[in-house]
Image: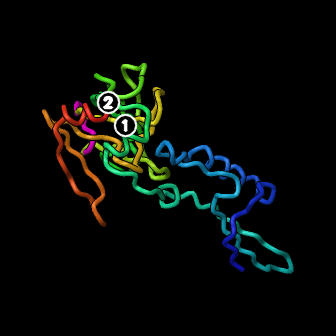
Amino acid sequence: MLNNKPILSDKSMSPYLFQKAQKARQHTFAPDQGRYVLRDGEYSVRILSLSMKGGLVVVATLFASASFACTCIFSGAFEVFAEQHPVIVRGKVLQHGERIPNNSGYFKTMTIVVSDTLKGSFPYSTFEFYGDTGMSCLRYITLDDYPVGSEHLFILASDESLQPLMVCGESSLLINGDTVQGRVRDGGGYGTYELNLGELMERVR
């Protein structure tokens, strides 16, 4: 029999699945920071009960897939998303971190050099973003979107030196001279736009 109800107690899980559930809790994040929290009783577990040689065999599969982790409501373009978060900085991509296996041009992290803090207080001159690796609700760090030397406006989740590159809203804009270039969801795809850099910086400060 297939039972789609979530397991509400960790005691009913095998040690292996309990460890996976604990790990899933640690690597999902809260929506108020562009991240997700997996609370007790909310992780998705399916139970398959089979009768075998007079005994009961229970097979459980914990779904911690990218499709589960990345279910979120898009919170809007840069200016709208900025209102929901405490820190905005202007910075340049210094270097990329470790590559994601089997994904050319995709990286686990990138280091940013800060040139200005537009909103809030940020005590670091450099910091590190971590992006999606296929199992979290974050934006991918790619060579196309974030080449070394490129300059951006970034919305940060906190004032810490390690930051998630958020995806549930437009969390960065590419600076190109006196303009910024953005990309937002437009129906089933994405639409691009340009804004005056100076005017936008004044509005989000």
Q: Position of residue 112 (x, y in %)?
A: 34, 28
| Amino acid on which disc 1 is placed | Ile
* Disc with the residue nearer the chain's start (1 vs 2): 1
In 3D space, how far apart are the residues under numbered discs 1 and 2 (Cα atoms)?
12 Å
Residue ID for mark 1: 155
Residue that protrudes farthest toward the right in the picture: 54
Q: Position of residue 145 (x, y in %)?
A: 26, 44
Q: Residue at x 86, y 80 (%)?
A: 54
SS label for mark 2: loop
Magenta residues, as a range? Answer: 145-150
Q: Position of residue 27 (x, y in %)?
A: 56, 45
Quarter of the image that includes the C terminus:
top left
Q: Position of residue 99 (x, y in %)?
A: 38, 41
User: In the rendered view, does 123 fall on the left or right side of 64?
Assistant: left
Q: Nearer the viewer, residue 53 or 144?
A: 144
SS label for mark 1: strand
Quarter of the image that includes the N terminus:
bottom right
Q: Residue at x 19, y 39 (%)?
A: 180
Q: Is residue 96 above or below residue 81?
A: above
Residue ID for mark 2: 205
Q: Is residue 44 above or below residue 196?
A: below
